[in-house]
Image (spheres, grey):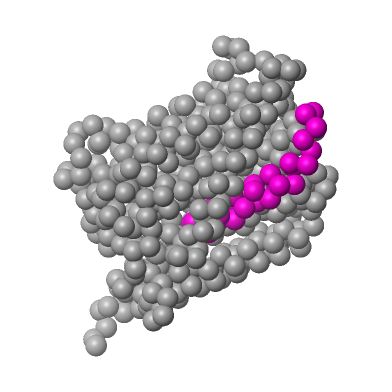
Amino acid sequence: MLKRRIRFLDLTLFYVISALSLRWIATAAATGPGAITLWVFAWAAFFVPLASCVLMLSRSFPQEGGLYVWTRIAFGDFAGFIAGWTYWMSNLPYFPAVLYFAAGSLLFASNHGRGATEGSRIYYMLFSVLCLVLITGLNVVGLNWSKWLSNLGAFGVWIPVFVLVVLAGFTLARFGPATHFTARSLIPRSGFNDAVFWSTIAFAFGGCEAASFMGEEIENPRKNIPRALLLGGVLITIGYIGGTIAMLVALPAERIRGLGGFMLALDQMCGAFGMAVLVPAIAILVAMSNIGSASAYLTSTARLPFVAGLDAHLPPVFGRVHPRFGTPYIAIVSYGAAGILFAFLGQAGTSVKGAYDVLVSMSILTYFIPYVFLFLAVIRLRQVGGVWLRVLASVGLLTTIVTLILSAIPAEDDPNKSLTLFKTIGSTVALVAIGVLVYAGSTRRKELPA
């Protein structure tokens, strides 16, 4: 029996760390002021529908497993398993991707950004592996320990964003903005390659469904999930829009780069105001935020194979609970080990930035498949909400489908677009096919005589 260890504050901080990411602020700012308009659009077309659907589904079905359970109730065991499987697998490339960002940020703490995104492949790989070992170990011991990584990570997001916004205010008052904000500049660019970026913006707002995977470990979920989701949603939205504006005040868009752009903006402003001593401390906080984000997703997503083990869609060993710590330790350890494997595979035969970009693209494509099931479940389950919730679910579903299509398109500066497209789509198809085979195997096992 799992223990209830997640309180209102823990849950609010979990929502913040699972959805608000400094790397997406830098990625958005690199495209210019039009990203601000895209943030507002993504908030209305994806985050609001997603948060509303998660809130109502969590109230109606607060069991452990979240999206897996909701899809199973709406469409049956096979759909539920595939929704859970794709969500589970999508986070495997996410772990090294977010930990590469943490590793790059830590280089700022040692050398103020010189070579921050060009570190040794071995460095990035070892950093990711060691972090995943730590995260996995703490999760096996229990949420009373592992939740502190995500809680500290949430503060590791907000303190740098707060410092960034304050310094941007000083910069605006003393030097003026590095970027000129006009009505015309706020119109998103409409080129083909610019449209690909829209999928990244929508992806950034994902994550508020993750806490519901731990439904039975949340104190009073019907009360705390809506309150925490509302507060967390406000903080997430302010962080993304405010952080993007602040970065564009500090630097012109062409000087911002995904892996190190956030720290570059802070480094420049701290230097301009004689506060360079703050840079290493902020870099450590940025790294901590990404480690906390990886911990939050491992904590929640490991509950999916646990529930699938209880349902015998995975070997029953996945459903075991540790006799001392009361945690689904087999599911946690296996998930952590799979994340470590991806950390090795992600660095095979490519540059750090190339591995980072492929992992993010692969994560986006696989990650959005479960949202199709989630929004369809709300549309199908008439007892969940009313007509307006189904309208919101339809808007979210349309946004998700468009995002799936756009996320498969390689970046404009990709040196080998055909290879990247093949790797992104091929790996996604392979992951889904493996899930189908695993489910088929479990069905055959159930049909065998006892």
Q: Position of residue 124 (x, y in %)?
A: 72, 58
| Majority SS type along the magenta span | helix
- Tag count: 0
Q: Position of residue 388 (x, y in %)?
A: 23, 32
- Give left or right: position of 255 versus 168: right
Q: In this view of the protein, can residue 186 be seen by the observer?
A: yes
- Of all residues, the one furthest to the bottom in this rendering is 450
Residue 177 magenta-highlighted: no
Residue at (25%, 36%) from the top-left corner? 389
Q: Quadrant of the N terminus?
A: bottom left
What span is in magenta?
A: 272-297
Q: In this view of the protein, can residue 405 be seen by the observer?
A: no
Depth order, front residue of 321/432: 321
Residue at (74%, 55%) from the top-left corner? 350
Q: Quadrant of the C terminus?
A: bottom left
Residue 397 falls in image quadrant: top left
- Is 289 situated above or below 446? above
- Give left or right: position of 391 versus 263: left
Residue at (65%, 23%) from the top-left corner? 169
Residue 291 magenta-highlighted: yes
